[in-house]
Amino acid sequence: MKKGIHPAYREVVFQDTSSDYKFITRSTMNSDETITMEDGKVYPVIKVEVSSASHPFYTGKNLFVDTAGRIDKFKQRYQKK
C-alpha cells in the first residue's frame, strides 16, 4: 500500500439518535464529537438517524413518520393537475 493516501481506520461509536442505541465498530469516518463508553475509552461518535434498533424491518414495528407534512405537500401539488 502507498503511504499517506489512506484514511485512518479506527474504532468509532455509531449512535442511533432515535433510539439512543450505541455500538462500537471500525470506520474511516471523522467526527469532532467524542463519547466515553462503558469500557472507559473515549471514541469519536457518529450520529445516525436509523439503525437496526430503530428500523421497522428489524424491530417489526410499522412506524409512519410524516416529516414536515411531505405527504400533504405532495397531494396539494399534484391535486391541481
Image: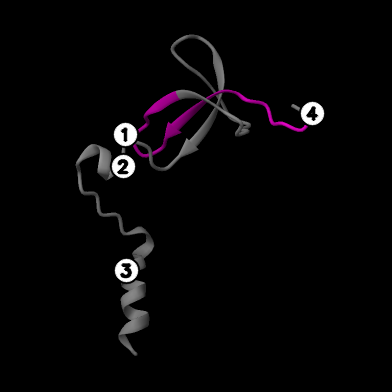
Work out how far the residue at label 4 is from the one at label 3, CA to CA, in angstroms: 48 Å
Q: Residue at x 32, y 68 (%)?
A: 71
Q: Is residue 19 magenta?
A: yes
- Give the secondary structure at mark 3: helix
Work out how far the residue at label 4 is from the one at label 2, CA to CA, in angstroms: 37 Å
- Residue 4 got which mark? 4
Between discs 2 and 3, the one toward the N terminus: 2
Q: Which residue is mark 1?
A: 53
Looking at the picture, which amino acid does disc 4 mark?
A: Gly
Asked whether disc 2 touches disc 3, contact meaning CB atoms under 8 Å apart, the reply is no
Work out how far the residue at label 3 is from the one at label 1, CA to CA, in angstroms: 25 Å
Between discs 4 and 3, the one toward the N terminus: 4
Indicate the quadrant where residue 76 lies.
bottom left
Q: Quadrant of the N terminus?
A: top right
Range of residues picked out in magenta? 3-23
Asked whether disc 1 touches disc 2, contact meaning CB atoms under 8 Å apart, the reply is yes
Q: Which residue is mark 2?
A: 55
Mark 3 is surrounded, within 10 Å at the Cα level, by few (under 14), some (14 to 19) or many (20 or more) other residues, namely few
- Image check: 1 left or right of 41? right
